[in-house]
Amino acid sequence: MITPAMCVTYSYYNSPTIWLSISQILTFVILNVFAAPLRCETLATRILTWYVGFQTLKPFLEVREMGFCLSRWTNLTIVTGCFAGVCLFVFAGLCVAEEELTAAEARICVTGFDHNRPDPFPGLGDFIGWAEAIERMPNGDLLLAHSAGYYHASFASPRQIEPELKKQYASEGWPVDYVAPTGGRSMVCRSTDNGKTWSKPELVVDYRLDDRPDSLLTCRDGTILCGVNVQASWYGYPRAPPGYEDDISGLNTQQFVVRSTDNGHTWSDPIWIEPPPGATYERAHGRPIQLDDGGILWATYCNSPEEIFGAVHRSDDSGKTWKIHSVVRRKNNKHIDEPAIAQLNDGRLIMVARPDGGVLYSDDDGANWVESGSTVITSGKMKAPQLFVLQDGTVVMVGTWRNLRVWLSRDNGQTWTNDFPLDTSCYGYPGGLVLDDESILVSYCKSGRTPNRVYVIRFQVNEDRTGIKLLRVGDP
């Protein structure tokens, strides 16, 4: 902090010029208003030193007559005061420019293969990732859910992968014979300082097959729901091979929910979600939402021999029981993959799905859905969308399109901006949470392979809704 003493150290010269006093006050105010909050003390002190040094030359240019000081250079004080003001405003602008953070400067590593690792367990490798959920707890803590295992999918052993697919995986570096008695595990990290620091990973659940968390929701009654994806130990077959028919009802993947009533410190037994008829697997990515009537909706996606389609499950008792609320399909056999849902300010629900960011709406609380024909992107494949709606109705989508990016809509999702890079060095697959100041805290992973890390990053949409700015995690 720059103190008043620094601005008046030269006052012993007893200059009678009022401009000098005004410039002293302005110097003190500007330096402390602009420099200290923007971490520019070094630059500020340097400019102040130039200014003070210039002023200290003035007494040698004065002559003393009739017992008082009469400056020949009164105008010099005015000039130097103006000079100081200009310099101060210039460096304030430079400080603002300096505060434009890069992703590497703004993000914080929560956990990873080389940072804050989980305690060792059989099956743990260097894949600490899939950070698809972050949520505020009733007591104010932040909880970030993530997986811990050995690869993109950490199949429990023994496992059976279709032979040709197994060769492909092995050629890509997948440790196909890794010993993992229960596969990967679902874990959480906790922050008590708005995301600046994080606890060591703690266990949510270790099911007998590979599991990883894919959603978190704090219900209005304080109950915490964590959605979990369970992966069978077979892959690449149209149906479960012999010996695996009884694992999760012969499905390749299935969802369950665990509940917590103590801010995520302990969790209930699994509550299984039954998929729609005809599904060979059911998976999820987007965060659930709670409606005004208390109902909770959770969007999932399912595979069948014909298509990938969506489903919405509903709970009316804070996650104790669930029912299929709707099955969602697009025209022309387009996929509903990794759907995200949110409630718009006009009461309708919006859904965005991989691979093209196809937009659908519901005006009856998710019982029926209508495809709009609009998409978020026009080329390539978009993955893992998350949707947020700001107070003024702006819809924000965060997702992976080659890397981690952001899109905005001012018309409820009918049209979208071009993408804004959030962290182009990382794969993404984000979770997210709107904070009280309407900045958005995003959780995501470095890669889809090993070695992997989990990050958080914070951004805010600008006032005219034409871009985003990175902010420091945990700062006011």
Image: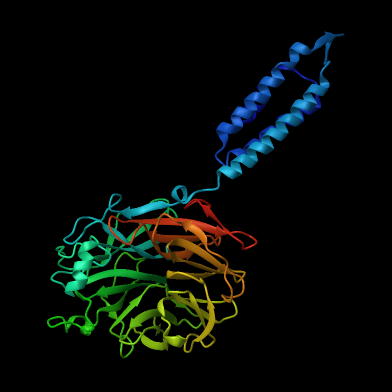
323 or 303, which lies in front? Answer: 303
Tell me the quarter of the picture where residue 59 sits: top right
As displayed, is residue 18 above or below residue 410? Answer: above
Tally the numbered discs.
Answer: 0
Residue 358 image point, x, y percent:
49, 78
Report if residue 10 is visible in the image: no
Q: Residue at x 23, y 77 (%)?
A: 236
In the image, residue 306 above or below residue 188: below
Q: Is residue 180 left or right of residue 101?
A: left
Residue found at x 83% / y 12%: 68
Q: Using the rendered view, name the quadrant where residue 354 is placed.
A: bottom left
Q: Position of residue 410 (x, y in %)?
A: 61, 71
Image height of 462 relative to 295, above or below: above
- Report whether residue 240 is seen: yes
What residue is at 46 percent from the left and 74 percent from the top?
356
**Colour theme:** rainbow
Q: Nearer the viewer, residue 31 or 173?
A: 173
Horizontal side of residue 120 vs 305, given as left or right: left
How far from the left and from the top, in percent, is residue 161?
Answer: 18, 73
Q: Quadrant of the N terminus?
A: top right
Residue lying furthest bottom: 277
Nearest to the observer: residue 259 or residue 307: 307
Residue 442 locus on image (x, y percent): 45, 61
